Image (cartoon, rainbow, N blue to C red):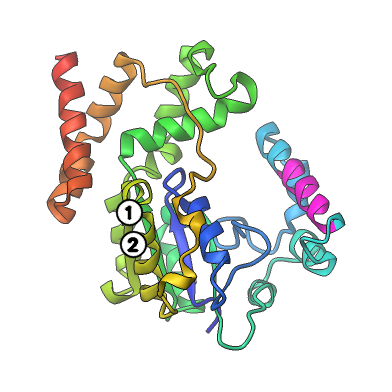
Amino acid sequence: MIPDFLVIGSQKAGTTWLDRNLRNHPNIWLPPEKELHFFDFPPLVPFFFLLFAPMRPIRHWAKNRMVRDFAKVREGQQALGWYVSYYFSIRTQHWYLSLFKPAKGQVAGEITPRYAILGEAKIAKVHALVPDAKIIYLLRNPIDRIWSDLAMFHRPKFGSQGLHTADPEAIEKFIGNATHQASSRFLKNLHRWEKYYPPEQIFIGFQEQIRDTPEQLLKDVCLFLGVDASDEHICAMAKQRINSHQYPDIPSDIAYALAKLFISDIEQLHRRFNNPHTAQWLASAQQQLAKGA
């Protein structure tokens, strides 16, 4: 059953890097658009309705996305039929499955980082539609992830280096938002997905692997998906930093607050995975707590 795999997250943990690299593999097919948002958006409602959403940021995001993709159509990078179907059709299960058009011998999947935080009822619907799908979940230091998410949210207004000029109340509001926090609560998310998908159908990767051993991580993903993992299919792009921005360091008071917020999650993550990545996350959080004590 197509799709064969779903990359469910995390936001700001390397999903764009994975998207660009998987697109270069001849045995993997991905839709023209990253982030289909089928399972996390309201059912049936066509995407273009978001242009009339009550919240301005959503309207702005939808408009920019549609304009960007239409530019791809004009440049011949995206088929007009796919664009029209994606943005203007009623979003049914049949519509969703029709978006996947792999060639013979290709596995097909999609990458929508918000799927990680789906509630159990929605994950049950995912499983009912694609029970054999393989699930890929990339993790990152929970504290760094939410700070990067915050920086991306404010970048259109303040730029990559101007985050320190943002209203402290706006920063506190963002960090206090339950949805933003949920994207950093990896184990809670993973536990919900594990109720429906067995361990052999779930791959866990770490953002630090993209930095330190990107080619090996990409080979591991290919092996997990059952496609050729030989060196000839691991392109030079694997070593490139993609969608990467340099943001100011986390202010000490915010770092302390985030360490208090996520220390329990990080301790549990380290108990489960017990690797150098989670060890570093734990040491960093403990250091921030010691500074603020």
Determine which of the numbered discs, if any, sits on residue 216 in the image.
Answer: 2
Q: Where is residue 36 in the image (x, y as percent from the top left)?
A: 62, 60
**Image quarter hosting the C terminus:** top left
Secondary structure beneath dot 2 equals helix
Residue 12 higher or lower than 131, as above or below: above
Magenta stretch mostly in which secondary structure?
helix
Is 27 left, or right, of 259 in this rendering? right
Q: Can residue 122 be seen in this view?
A: no
Q: State the image quarter where residue 285 is shown.
A: top left
Residue to which mark 1 is pinned: 213
Q: Which residue is drawn at 47% across and 72% down?
A: 232
Q: Position of residue 80 (x, y in %)?
A: 84, 65
Q: Which amino acid does label 1 sit on?
A: Thr
Asked whether 65 falls inside the magenta stretch, the response is yes
Residue 252 higher or lower than 115, as above or below: above
Asked whether 183 falls inside the magenta stretch, the response is no
Q: State the image quarter where residue 205 is shown.
A: bottom left
Q: Residue at x 16, y 55 (%)?
A: 272
Dot 2: few (<14), some (14–19), or many (≥20) neighbours within 10 Å?
some
Secondary structure beneath dot 1 equals loop
Determine which of the numbered discs, if any, sits on residue 114 in the image.
Answer: none
Q: Which residue is drawn at 55% across and 62% down?
A: 39
Q: CA–CA distance between discs 1 and 2?
A: 6 Å
Residue 39 higher or lower than 127, as above or below: above
Is 43 left, or right, of 1 in this rendering? right
Write down the region rendered in magenta: 62-73
Q: Are marks 1 and 2 in contact (CB under 8 Å)?
A: yes
